[in-house]
Image (cartoon, rainbow, N blue to C red):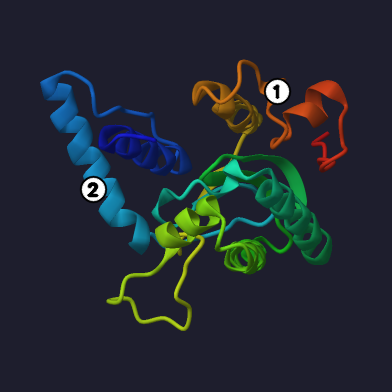
Amino acid sequence: MYGERAILNETFGLLRIACGLPIRRCDSPAGAERSSALGDAILWLLMPTLKRHFVSGQLQFLTSSTYRRAQLFASERFCRDFVEILGQVRSEMSFQLIGWVLMPEHFHLLIRPDPSEATSLIMQELKKRSAQRILAALQQDRGHPWCHSMLTQVRLPPSVHSDSKFRVWQRRFYPFGIYSEKKRLEKLNYMHGNPVKRGLVNSPDQWPWSSFRFYYLNDSSLLAMDRIP
């Protein structure tokens, strides 16, 4: 389990990555920590109000996290469900998938949507379908301790008025336009290295839930990527 500081570091890190900003940690020396915390707080406040503008033909680096950072994708079953649904949405909405990684509580995608404005619809479908699949499974097996624990984490508080009692994903996602080959490779390397950085595996090839194995081991058994010439 993450401590409070680790959760802050990871959450702010995701936001800064999505905006193309350098990562700053909360455990830096006092002066730098105050500066970093102020910058991150401003970024946190601004993100919900940033207007999304998607440029035609541009790659999009997308980030989304589970509600309350619940580690739903510690389950291999849910990982496979997510990959299956991602493949379905990709086929139906005809976007190019350049790279991806699924972590226990968030995911990143690198895509080229067509039209570019379809980005929000793609994310809406992916999150809606995966949420429906996950909640149905959790409720069916609610007697299992892990399922019961996950349902408790994603249960909405009484103050939230919603048709559902549960929420799998945070409502917003964070897009970042990729303007250059350098940035494309940077995001791919970041995604592939994420499980190693988190200490989940020792090397990227040991993590099945990313595009690393496609690019470096010619393994398309989960998902084949669209290569950029």
Q: Pick whichever, 30 or 134, lies toward us.
A: 134
Identify the image quadrant of the N terminus: top left
Q: How many marks?
A: 2
Measuring from the top left, give residue 146's x and y in whole percent.
Answer: 52, 50
Q: Is residue 112 visible?
A: no
Q: Residue at x 74, y 48 (%)?
A: 80
Question: Looking at this rendering, what residue extends furthest in the front direction?
Answer: 143
The residue pinned by badge 2 equals 42
Identify residue for label 1: 206
* Residue 135 x/y as whole percent: 59, 66
Image quadrant where residue 171 sits = bottom left
Residue 95 sits in quarter: bottom right
Left or right of 181? Residue 224 is right
In the rendered image, the vertical position of residue 108 relative to residue 181, given as above or below: below
Please provide percent x and percent y for residue 205.
72, 22
Tell which tag, 1 or 2, sits nearer the viewer: 1
Is 14 on the left or on the right of 127, as rendered? left
Which residue type carries mark 2? Ile
User: Relative to residue 156, is residue 176 depicted above or below?
Assistant: above
**Element assignment for label 2:** helix
Instruction: State which tag comes first along the sequence, 1 or 2.
Output: 2
What's the residue type where badge 1 is placed?
Gln
Left or right of 73, for residue 208: right
Q: Quadrant of residue 132?
A: bottom right
Q: Residue at x 11, y 23 (%)?
A: 31
Q: Give the image location of residue 29, x and y in percent.
A: 16, 18
